[in-house]
Image: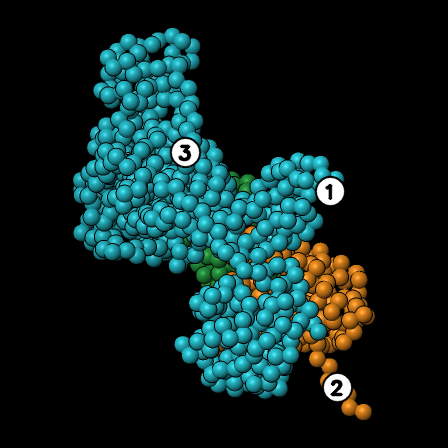
Amino acid sequence: MQRIGVFVCWCGSNIAGTVDVKAVAEALKSEPGVVFSTDYQYMCSQAGQDLIKNAVKEHGLTGIVVCSCSPRMHEATFRKTAAAAGLNPYMVEIANIREQCSWVHKEMPIGTEKAIILGKAAVAKVHLNAPLTPGESPVTKRALVIGGGIAGIQTALDIADAGFEVDIVEKKPTIGGKMAQLDKTFPTLDCAACILTPKMVDVAQNEKVRIFSYSEVTEVKGFVGNFDVTIKKNARYVKEEICTGCGACVDKCPMKKVPNEFNLGMDNRRAIYIPFAQAVPKVATIDPNACNMLKNGKCGLCAKVCTAGAIDYTQKDEYIEEKYGAIVVATGFNPISMDQFDEFAYNQSKDVITSLEFERLTNAAGPTAGKLLRPSDGKHPHKIVFVQCVGSRCAACAEKGKEYCSKICCMYTAKHAMLTRDKYPDTEVYVFYIDVRTPGKNFDEFYRRAVEEYGVRYIKGMVGKIVPEGDKLKVQASDLLSNKQLHIDADLVVLAAAIEPDKSARPLATMLTASMDTNDFFTEAHPKLRPVESPTAGVFLSGACQGPKDIPETVSQAGAAASKVIGLLAKDKLTGNPCVAYSDEMMCNGCSSCEKVCPYGAITYEEKEFRMPDRSTAIRRVAVVNPAVCQGCGCCTVTCPSGAMDLRGFMNSQIMAEVDAICK
Amino acid sequence: MNNPYLQEELLRMSGVDPKKCMACGKCSASCPAYDEMEYHPHQFVSMVKNGDIEPLMKSESLYRCLTCFACAERCPRGVEPAKLVEAVRLAVIRQQGANRLKAQDVPALLDEEIPQQALVSAFRKYAK
Amino acid sequence: MQVKEYKPLIVAFCCNWCSYAGADLAGNNRLNYPAEVKIIRVPCSCRVNPMFILRAFQRGADGVILCGCHPGDCHYTSGNYFTRRRMAMLFSMLDFLGIERERTRVEWVSAAEGAKFAATMNDFVETVTALGENKRLEDLRCKR
């Protein structure tokens, strides 16, 4: 039998105004197990807390009920008080007689009566409370960053800077991501490669960072502080440690007609290739779908010219298992496919391109060495039409576009238009916009410069259709402000395609049990207050995998994610929430129902040996809850058909006792 | 000019929600009959949204719409301006209690240039 | 003989993250609702075992309302979806047993919806009061 003390707070007149606190204290005194009951003006004050501490010592209390404000307000306070008095902090229950009683009822007798009932319910619950100790688990002091774009690179650098080891897993042969493909960056117009490639070198040379390029994460097990991850290193048929990146093999490779994905298929590469000159790691990779040697064993030229002897046609995919304390998702984005937008004739004309293709066309390292030439005939375009919001803000066409604003298109279109007018003043540049959205430091000034100084013609309206005719593109569009329909004979059309999360994000989210929104962006633990954490403990978000972002935002989010990771890895042990589910192994019948409903993957099944009543032993399959992963929602307890599953702190018997006390 | 009853009637008849419109102008950019019209597709949407319907009912624009549904097809927000135009036309017909043209008047007005699609939709418009 | 005014007994289960906070907000804003409503805090609406509701009716409750986060907003990602399904089944079974549909309710109340919480409780108490005392599942052995 518990020895329970009841402490009724006046909260000045907040409670005492509508609840007869003395009557409440008196009424609860006669409840079974209550050995002490009192009231005080401010229970949360130092004097009030001392009152509780003294009472615990004097009356040998084992449980405490505080009738006061909401537990969301002062539960932590009174738990600390109990702990200071030598009691287990989880032996405290709060009856909420302020927010849910005195403040919402006006009449004293009614308020008092309800306060007594709420007090009784709390007493009934405390009777069944058991001391709880939060579990502890060790932390593996190594982080995994999935994705090697600017987000992943920055996160890895920041984590490594704090002295922790980091691994980057990148599915492409090189890190660098989308930013490596860009030409200039808004609004300062510094070149993307000039600011990115030093970072790529930094990360490659940092001894705390390992880079797994051309690799994927295939399995994630475990929980915060203790993830077990399997990484698949795809065979690149080149020994990474030996290859010097000299490029002799690339020059000799006879397979010259492989579309170059780095230039979005606008030129060709060889079957053995290094994606771009500044690639990290700078090693060659053989494309198994294009290489003759791998397909039918005829060729082997690259092996002959390689002086280092790095080529290995027999290389196999390799699986690496590694332990991590934290995982950062930085899987990034891709422009959506333009196949569904027939009206823009993307598939009919080579001269209708996406903005990312335009980046490559203007990039000095791109297919045209930075000269703006039409992909179809290599002529200089004189009339360029930019179309914004292609597939963005597209609510009606889920199969075509995206409902959200892609955020970065207004700015990069302004950049493209401005740079075109700067380099080629003889071109006419039209930008069709719905709204120009430029919230960012120096963003609107940048856009206005494009209009005012560079003479880019911004037209409020949309392009309705594009028809290739001869070597021209007939653009039919609306100009809403002058209420006209325009017909422009353009040489080049650039579509600002919406961006979407990388396709690899969805299976990854399943592996991590991290939640996603309907657009496959990762959701944050709290949209405002915890923007870089996933609701799954130990999983953090960096960059555009969480929502469309420009580079400055991505870098700041990457830093924020890194600081959260460092905060986690700096701990030697993690203390969990003790109010977690547990399974009575004797009652568990091994049905797996709980495992299926658990949103965190906290429940696993194990074969355990049991002593049966007849003293024989039997192996039974039973549920085991990992207290470090369980967040304590209690869904499994209701799902369990045999009643084996229960939730500490909110046990079936405790809630039942509350129901009984209320319904008496 | 605001006519809430008529506006409600139009919205009910057409099933269009003009509040969804984000004023991008893709409807007017797609419209093949744009230059023939006094009020353009995007204006239909915004005028109906504002309850400014009577000028629309008086306008010849109603009969310039080919009902080709290019605007409805391409609208990124699913507003379907063509259905609104159709609804305004119906409202006119109902108000007058008679059609603008009789079916037998149509052949005389035909010319070779008229596309098949326009003919079909014309019959839908007039032969009630 | 003095006729005692009938006051229903309502048990409200509120999830810790949304609805309990919503109820607190109703208090902060001093939005009145009847004292017949007694709130039990649970971590998530999916923690509410149908047994608790049956027990409440058995012990003489006249109405049971279950409040959780809005679908899609569950603190535990998916808990309220389970609640929605479970309660749909439980309530139709209770209806079959003679406990009217109006006596049971699931309502989504966010932490910001103090006004909705108060309005919901006012409405629910009014509905249950109109139905009168619930006798169907009452355990005669524990008669009040």
Kindly check if marks 1 and 2 are in contact, taking CB atoms under 8 A apart as contact: no
Q: Residue at x 69, y 43 (%)?
A: A589
Q: Residue at x 59, y 85 (%)?
A: A23
Q: CA distance from mark 3 to mark 1?
A: 43 Å
Mark 1 residue type: Pro
Q: Residue at x 58, y 72 (%)?
A: A4
Q: Residue at x 57, y 41 (%)?
A: A604
Q: Position of residue B65 (x, y in %)?
A: 50, 51
Q: Position of residue A453 (x, y in %)?
A: 18, 51
Q: Is residue C13 left or right of residue A82?
A: right
Q: Quadrant of the N terminus of chain C?
A: bottom right
User: The chain shown in green is which?
Assistant: B
Label 3 vs label 1, nearer the camera: 1
**Residue A516 in view:** no
Q: Is residue C62 left or right of residue A241?
A: right
Label 1 vs label 2, nearer the camera: 1
Label 1, on which residue?
Answer: A613
Mark 3 residue type: Glu
Taking depth in this image into account, of A329 and A88 the one nearest to the observer is: A88
Q: Position of residue A562 (x, y in %)?
A: 32, 47
Q: Chain of mark 3?
A: A
The secondary element bearing badge 2 is classed as: loop
User: The chain shown in orange is which?
Assistant: C
Label 2, on which residue?
Answer: C4
* Image quadrant assignment for residue A216: top left
Q: Is residue A369 above or below residue C40?
A: above
**Residue A566 in view:** yes
Label 3, on which residue?
Answer: A322
* Image quadrant assignment for residue C43: bottom right
